[in-house]
Amino acid sequence: MRGRQVLMETLLAHGIERIFGNPGTTESPLLDSLLDYPQLQYVVHLHEGVAVGAANFYGQASGKTAFVNLHVAPGLGNAIGMIYGALKNSTAMVVTAGQQDTRLRLRDPVLGHDLAAIAEPVTKWSVQVERADELGPILQRAFKVAAEPPAGPVFVALPIDVMEQETAIGPGRPARIYRAARPDPAGIDAMAKLIVAAKNPTIVAGDDVARSGASGALERLVERIGASVWFEGLRGRNSFPTDDPAYRGTLAFDVAGVAKQLADNDLVLLVGGPFFEEVWYAPGSPFAAGCKVLQVEAAPPRMAYNFAVDAGVIAGVDAALHALWEATTGVAGAAARERQATFRKLKEQDAAAQKARIGKAWSRSPTSMARAMAEVRNGAPADAIVVDETITANLDLFKTFTFKGPHDYFSGRGGGIGQGVAGALGVAVAEPKRPVLCLSGDGSSMYSIQALWTAAHHDLPIVFVILANREYRVLKHNIDAYRQRFAVKSNKPYMHMDLTGPALGFVDLAKGMGVAGTQVSRAEDIQPAIANAFRSGKPHLVEIEIEGKR
């Protein structure tokens, strides 16, 4: 058996159905083998970063380990930012790249470099296969390490000559590991006592709640103990219904902001996440003095990593939340009901405030972000999956759309832009029976605009909405924050943050890659444009002109 056969048979053994890749010369053994393995669909991309971005979101949406094949040193370099995003998203992923013939190692061949060293900083494990006898064992370990909580990308370099070597060591079997450990009863008891004693508990729900199928358990616990629920500022999944009165929104990007939001809580339960991703430094703690901090994680690395906890439990997230629900039987008394009534009033106030915000900005031209989100929502199917990279329109998105289940919303973590347009491909591949709505800004989308060609090539009926304000609006906000935080007195303009001269033409870009497009400059045309795009049953881009920074 040749090395390339070991690779292909390993993929089949581990349940891989799709390869996300960008072809190159050193990948010839894999590409040439595809005809012999029709079970494997190759999803072709025009840029390595787009391939990894699509695989990242595919892994999230499918719940499977994603597999990627890239091209030597420059190709791997192109993908590093998106591999970083997959690491931050905790996506189980095996990334491979073809490597030059090992016999050329000392000759510094074209495109040659130490691939394992390039990938090492942004992966859980990075290795090069040196001989065909290693291929089966290394791949088996790669799949195992990638899926271990917290999951993440693993990199394997595949030299072209190794892929053609003969070996008697075939593919390994996938490990059947049951990782959902039962929580320690003593830990659950300690947590339950603190929860019962709390007068105003809150929960920060991380992505692992959605990833582990624990959303239902979280809802039951929230209802019983009368807790509010927050998401982190950056989240990849939807772990709690956003129309539930207990949902309070997303946390700030600095300690001071988080502390203000959690100031009235005497207990905070952190569930399944890296807590917290900050943008700006601020001194102090996110928790009020005397606040009890609890944490539930599926694996030790994140437990008490940044904060001391009063009680921490390492266990399957669903099992731990269910155990807490059982241990707090009888808690839902008058105090819990009173808190729930308060949440309902706050929810009504939030809805009224957003309605007023939309109304105030209704007639503005160009269209306000608030109205744009309302019009897009009204034009999209009720069951549409939202792939989000709205950034500065994010707040209006969350206040306008309702996300009930864990598969209703996908986004990137880590802050790297370009993940949305690429990621929509992976979501569409994983969820072919549901409509997919991708929301991105004009600046973000240009990092992975080649994704449009893949959508057309594979006939993925994604509706791409580009919110075009002709600027890097988030950078303008951030330079304002920088000037304030560092006491920089300035009335200077925003340098190099406008996307004009020339303006980007997204409908033309889409047409050049085989995707139909619609340009919308009037707010009243947004809803019908979105509805028509979905009715087409084809990939379609809608460019919406929206207001810039005011």
Image (tube, rainbow, N blue to C red):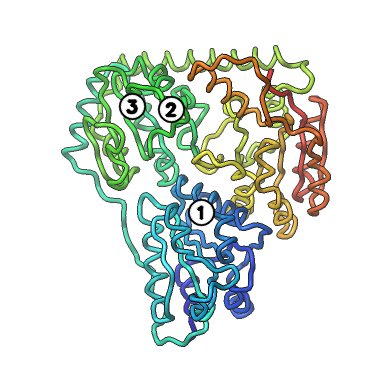
Q: Residue at x 32, y 17 (%)?
A: 200
- Regarding mark 2 in the picture, which secondary structure is present there? strand
Q: CA distance from mark 3 to mark 2?
A: 17 Å
Expressed as whole percent of the image width and height from the top left, the position of residue 480 reads 58, 20
Give the residue type at disc 1: Gly
Extreme left residue here?
186
Extreme front residue here?
107
Q: Which residue is mark 2?
A: 230
| Up-down relation of residue 100 to residue 351 (above or below) | below
Q: In this orientation, which residue lies closer to the viewer: 8 or 301?
A: 301
- Numbered label attached to residue 59: 1
Q: Which residue is mark 3?
A: 224
Kindly tell me whether residue 5 is visible in this rendering.
no
Q: Which of the two marks, 3 or 2, is nearer to us in this view?
A: 2
- The 10 Å Cα crowd at callout 2, few under 14, some 14 to 19, many 20 or more, is many
Check contact, mark 3 vs mark 2: CB within 8 A: no
Expressed as whole percent of the image width and height from the top left, the position of residue 413 reads 50, 41
Q: In this orientation, which residue lies closer to the viewer: 43 or 200?
A: 43
Q: In this orientation, which residue lies closer to the viewer: 349 or 298?
A: 298
Q: In this orientation, which residue lies closer to the viewer: 526 or 288?
A: 288
Q: CA distance from mark 3 to mark 1?
A: 33 Å
Kindly tell me whether residue 412 is visible in this rendering.
yes
Give the residue type at disc 2: Trp
| Up-down relation of residue 328 to residue 123 (above or below) | above
Q: CA distance from mark 2 to mark 1?
A: 24 Å
Drawn side of residue 180 relative to residue 7, left or right: left
- Regarding mark 1 in the picture, which secondary structure is present there? helix
